[in-house]
Amino acid sequence: MNWYENMNLWSGFSEVLFTPERARAAAEVVASSPLLAFPPGSRVLDQCCGVGFFTEPMARRGYRVTGVDLHRELLERAAAVCAAAGVKASFVQADVREHVTPEAYDVVVNMYTSFGYFDDHEDNLQVLRNAHRSLAPGGRLIVDLLSKETYASWAGTPKIVDVPGGMVVMRDTILDDWARYRTDWTLVRGDRAEHASLICYVYSAAELREMFAQAGFEEIECFGTLDGGPYDARATRLIVRGIKARPA
């Protein structure tokens, strides 16, 4: 079983992955980011939507949102969040390497470093190709992740995150000459410890820009914040946006 297929990771470390602070931050970003401001009624596909941190606030803005994720349990949580907020969204349980709905969306988003999960680089590229096929002409893809450049500024230093009744220790290891990294997590509560690991590709801006081009996108731009700031030495994230060309 690949790490991202293991629901024990998502549920066991839920207090770190799906915090109320992250939910509030996502809602604030959707409300304020010019990169996430779309025409009213836009059809939006939220790839790897998880518990709906971005699905719900985008639906609240009046977009017609579909969230896709591999795990039914996460989709159920996302649906419950939307129901509690009184907004409508659709949810599909599917593998993003396979999920395609030709020309069904105006926007595809992939947020919070949910890109790069697959062991084969070509599978990660396929996720972009599927997004391209699922977009209507003129539609846009937005991928938000922690890039190789920003990750390098702090990788290697163990991190400790407090959780109720304990803590999570996180340690990163660089793999394959900076092609991938492994993060090892240890949740400690009293005399009990739980362990989990995940391995992801880590892409530079130049590498991801080239992948967008290979997937068929044009007018590709890189940003360093979801406010639309430049991708430079002060960048905290890598946000890449590409457009599916309209027919000539």
Image (spheres, rainbow, N blue to C red):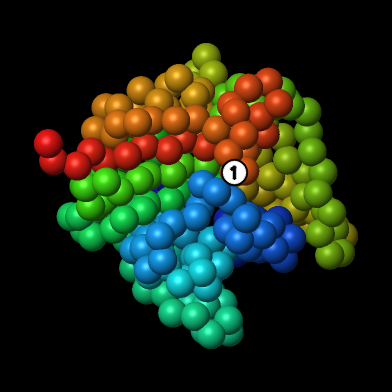
Give the side of residue 213 with respect to residue 195, left or right: left
Residue 213 visible in this rendered orientation of the protein:
yes
Q: Is residue 184 above or below residue 155?
A: below
The front one of 170 and 206 is 206
Residue 21, x across and y down, in percent: 74, 60
Count of labels in the image: 1
Give the side of residue 171 with respect to residue 58, left or right: right
The front one of 1 and 36 is 36
* Residue count near mark 1 (Cα–Cα under 10 Å), binned few <14, some 14–19, many ≥20: some
Q: Secondary structure at mark 1?
A: loop
Residue farthest along the left direction in this orientation: 248
The front one of 197 and 51 is 51
Q: Is residue 214 above or below residue 131?
A: above
Residue 146 visible in this rendered orientation of the protein:
no
Query: Which residue is tagged 1?
Result: 226
Residue shown at 18% from the left, 55% from the top:
102
Residue 157, x across and y down, in percent: 78, 28
Residue shown at 42% from the left, 38% from the top:
241
The quarter of the rendered structure image containing the C terminus is top left
Going by the numbered disc 1, the residue's amino acid type is Leu
Give the side of residue 231 with respect to residue 24, left or right: left
Residue shown at 42% from the left, 74% from the top:
89
Residue farthest along the top direction in this orientation: 177
Residue 51, x across and y down, in percent: 54, 66
Q: Is residue 238 above or below residue 64?
A: above
Please identify the quarter of the rendering in which residue 148 is found: top right
Please identify the quarter of the rendering in which residue 213 is found: top left
Residue shown at 52% from the left, 37% from the top:
239
Residue 111, x across and y down, in percent: 51, 49
